[in-house]
Image (cartoon, rainbow, N blue to C red):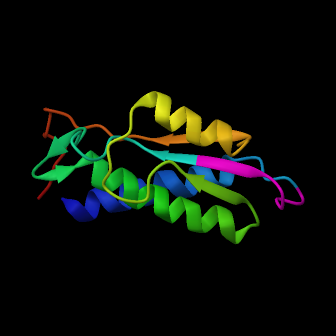
Amino acid sequence: MIRKITISILSILFLAFLAFPFPAHAAGHIICIDPGHGGSDPGAIYQGLQEKNVALDVATRLQILLQGVGYSVVMTRTSDSTLDNSQRATICNNAHAEALLSIHLNTSMNHSVDSD
């Protein structure tokens, strides 16, 4: 199941990467990435997998991709820390970010699509 989640997340990340309008010169453009939840707030939980951990992993991968094409990236969190929405907004605003990408995932009680 973890493999399916990882493949789905990477597929979505790849499609988002392709759809994001990259300027000809990304240098000087600042993107703020906000991995949802964290610290005492695990977010959605499925079979022990916590949203806060997956969101941070996806955000870190996205950071690498964006930096690879020349963007400056600011992360609201880089570890398992608790931030409220005001703190997240302050980090992005203080960085003068042009875009905020908030990473969240969900779970479902309908597991009929599982083939494992």
Pick whichever, 75 or 43, lies toward us: 75
- How many numbered discs, if any? 0
Left or right placement of residue 27 versus residue 8 in this view: right
Task: Report the magenta residues as a range.
Answer: 24-32
Q: Quadrant of residue 40?
A: top left
Left or right placement of residue 46 versus residue 20 in this view: left
Residue 114: x, y in percent? 16, 49
What residue is shown at x 83% (from left), y 57% (from top)? 28
Asked if residue 70 lies in the magenta stretch, the reply is no
What residue is shown at x 39% (from left), y 41% (from top)? 36
Pick whichever, 116 or 50, lies toward us: 50
110 w.r.t. 60: above or below: above
What residue is shown at x 67% (from left), y 66% (from top)? 67
Left or right placement of residue 47 versus residue 35 in this view: left
41 w.r.t. 68: above or below: above
- Is the C terminus in the top left, top right, bottom left or bottom right quadrant? bottom left
What residue is shown at x 24% (from left), y 39% (from top)? 41
Residue 24: x, y in percent? 89, 58
